[in-house]
Image: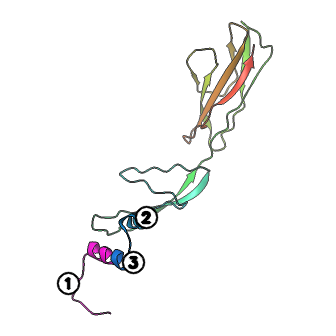
Amino acid sequence: VEREIPLDQFPSPTELWARYCKAKGLTPAQELVVTQDYFDDGSAIGTGKNPTKTYAVADTCNIRHWIRSAAGCQSDTVAQQVIVNPLPAPGFKTGLPACATRNIQFTDTSKANAGNIVKWTWNFGNGRPDSVINTGAPFNFTYNAPGSYPVKLTVETDKGCKNATPLIRNVTI
């Protein structure tokens, strides 16, 4: 049934929403699902002042943002294209001879995949803290005793991307 009503008698957005939920037979649990915002991949949008989203793969995404008032009114949408950069791929090789108390040359073979690598974090598996090196130039390292050392490398790009899992390669001395 339709009828014309004066503007001052028009229901508030909250009341209209309540009527809609009642007409559709939505339970409170269903209402939460219906009103939940989602990213374009179907995952739930974060709430609060600074919501974040982690993307599983590199891609160009269209991000839209809007504000919903306490009364349920939605603002204009702001849209921006965002590039999700690929993670860098760490890599290195070692020179010979690999002898205790002698310099062993480490050469970085990492790939940035986007931008440039600006930070290399090495752990030489000898019980000492990580070493941060800000150049990809070859360098020497010396082990004091024979053994197998799990060398770990993590790299970071000027895009802020860091490989999720360190590359671990055993170096035998």
Q: Which mark is residue 9?
A: 1
Q: Based on the displayed image, in which of its 4 quarters is residue 76 positioned?
A: bottom left
Q: Which mark is residue 33?
A: 2
Query: Circle 1: is it few (<14), some (14-19), or many (20+) Cα within 10 Å?
Result: few
Q: Residue at x 69, y 38 (%)?
A: 111
Q: CA distance from mark 2 to mark 3?
A: 14 Å
Q: Earlier in the sequence, mark 1 or mark 2?
A: 1
Q: Secondary structure at mark 1?
A: helix
Tell me the amino acid under the disc marked 2: Val
**Is 56 left, or right, of 2 in this rendering?**
right
Q: Position of residue 167 (x, y in %)?
A: 67, 31
- At label 3, the amino acid type is Lys
Instruction: Determine which quarter of the picture holds residue 75.
Output: bottom left
Report how far apart the C-alphas of labels 1 and 2 lie in the structure.
30 Å
Over which residues does the magenta segment extend? Answer: 1-19
Residue 148 image position (x, y, % from top left): 72, 16
Q: Give the mark, 2 or 3, whose residue is nearer the N terminus.
A: 3
Residue nearest the viewer, comparing 126 with 119: 126
Residue 53 drawn in magenta: no
Mark number, residue 24: 3
Residue 7 colored magenta? yes
Q: Nearer the viewer, residue 45 or 1?
A: 1
Residue 140 picture location, percent across and down: 69, 16
Secondary element at image label 2:
helix
Give the number of the mark in front: 1 or 2: 2
**Total count of labels:** 3
Outermost residue on the right side: it is 97
Which residue type does callout 1 highlight?
Gln
Q: Residue at x 65, y 39 (%)?
A: 112
